[in-house]
Image: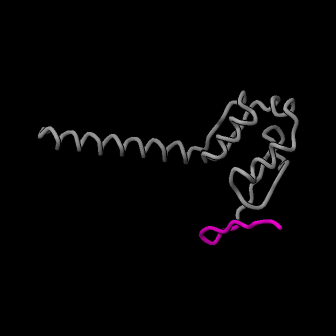
Amino acid sequence: MTKRHIKKGYKYITTVQDLENGEIIWASEGYGKEVLRQFFKKYTSEQLAAIEYVVADGAKYITECVEEYCPKAKRGIDPYHVVQWANEELDNTRKRLASDIKKNDLHY
């Protein structure tokens, strides 16, 4: 029985697309590390070693699977997560600096 993942009213499907021709080569209901592992387990180590590029969402579980199954592949990440991570780091830096200023009774 397939476990359906429902979050915020959405049903998730994980898809894998061939970047060279645009075809969907694999799909499964749900998302997450165990779902993605199903894709990688279909291939031999030689086939996985031939994967040169992986472009995907920046989710941690995707990075972990790519590192595990095709560590030599170059990784591309969606711009949304790159901007999100940059904004988080900027916010953390701003908070740290504001805290340092208060702690040291500095004025700017």
Q: Is residue 101 left or right of residue 82?
A: left
Q: How many marks?
A: 0
Front-most of residues 102 and 84: 102
Q: Position of residue 12 (x, y in %)?
A: 70, 62
Image height check: is 76 above or below 36? above
Look at 79% across and 46% down and name the residue there.
Answer: 17
Q: Quadrant of the C terminus?
A: top left
Q: Position of residue 38 (x, y in %)?
A: 80, 49
Q: Which residues are magenta?
A: 1-11
Front-most of residues 14 and 38: 38
Q: Magenta includes 7? A: yes
Q: Quadrant of residue 32?
A: bottom right
Q: Quadrant of residue 60?
A: top right
Q: Quadrant of the N terminus?
A: bottom right
Image height check: is 101 above or below 73? below
For this orientation, the residue located farthest to the top is: 72
Q: Is residue 57 left or right of residue 90?
A: right
Look at 69% across and 65% down and name the residue there.
Answer: 5
Look at 78% across and 40% down and name the residue there.
Answer: 19
Report the predominant secondary structure element of the magenta stretch: loop
**Colour scheme used in the picture?**
one colour
Q: Position of residue 80 (x, y in %)?
A: 55, 48
Q: Position of residue 87 (x, y in %)?
A: 42, 45
Look at 14% across and 38% down and name the residue there.
Answer: 104
Q: Magenta includes 22? A: no
